[in-house]
Image (cartoon, rainbow, N blue to C red):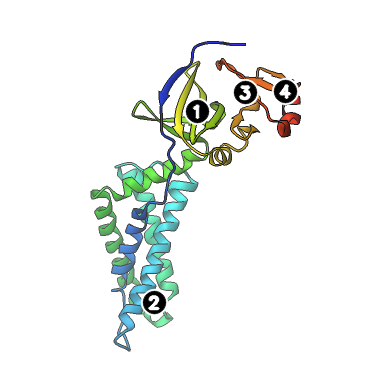
Amino acid sequence: MNNQPVQLVMGQFTRYKVDLLSLLIPLLVCLVLGLVQTQPDQPWSPILNWGLYGLLGFLGHRLSWLIHHQIRGIRFEKSFASQAPYLITGIGFTYGLVLLFNDLETVQKMAGLIALQVAAVSALVHLLMVSTGTLQKIALLTQAKALAKISIELQVEGRPVQVPLECLLAVQVEDHYCQIWYEAQNAVQQVMTHGSLKNLAAHAEGHLVQISRSALVNPSKVLQAEVGKETQVWLPGIAQPFKVSRSYRKQAQKWA
């Protein structure tokens, strides 16, 4: 069994939440696109049209963002090559939806004007969102969500560290504090943080398995398992063994 020293540093387990800024660009596009309106019959018609075009703009630009920066995984950068596909596709989707929700006569008469308005408003709002840093924040959120599916973020000595789930060795929870052991740079690191065993187990599903009410281990990293009156398992770089509860002994027998 490897008894190499373990470094102990304080950390903080963080979770990603929905960023309301992600709604700003489509919302602004939608509100301004409400001006694409022809001869309202009633005083309240512009309000309804603002709502309709707002929804269309929202759907168009969000669908474009989903395709380019989430499905295709294009990294958002401060460059025309990075931003043009998202903006052009968003304009196209919005324009198509606007035409779809207009009658044939309006489309025939004002298709060009509508296209110009959609493109101009979308471009202006896009520039506004880029200059204020909103799109950059949305992009960072998108990347963070993608990373959260394959890793866990820890604040180690004041620095955020992304630990791949496959590098996790074990988790031990006591009195609302949890110790996390993981492999990094050919060494084992130990972090003390706040966390819930239930939440960590759900987050690391498929990588860690529960062996007691307070511990999770990586089954692929188990060095040794002793099954008997007191069942225990050892993992590389961790001096003390982890006790296995009676209800989880069958799991430990596979590693013995």
Q: Earlier in the sequence, mark 1 or mark 4?
A: 1
Q: Quadrant of the N terminus?
A: top right
Q: Earlier in the sequence, mark 1 or mark 3?
A: 1
Q: Which residue is labeled 3 in the image?
A: 242
Viewer-nearest of discs 1 and 4: 1
In the image, residue 198 above or below residue 27: above
In x, y percent, where is residue 2? 58, 11
**Mark 1 surroundings: few (<14), some (14-19) or many (≥20) residues within 10 A:** many
> Considering the numbered disc 4 on the image, is that residue within a helix, a strand or a loop?
loop
| Mark 4: amino acid | Trp
Q: How many marks?
A: 4
**Mark 4 surroundings: few (<14), some (14-19) or many (≥20) residues within 10 A:** some
| Cβ–Cβ under 8 Å for marks 1 and 3 | no
In x, y percent, where is residue 92? 40, 61
Distance in Å between CA atoms under marks 3 and 2: 70 Å
Q: Looking at the image, which residue is at 52% across and 10% down?
A: 4
Viewer-nearest of discs 2 and 4: 4
| Mark 2: amino acid | Val
In x, y percent, where is residue 83? 34, 48
Q: Which residue is labeled 4 in the image?
A: 255
**Mark 3 surroundings: few (<14), some (14-19) or many (≥20) residues within 10 A:** many
| Number of the label disc, if any, that sits on residue 179 | 1
| Number of the label disc, if any, that sits on residue 62 | none
Distance in Å between CA atoms under marks 1 and 4: 23 Å
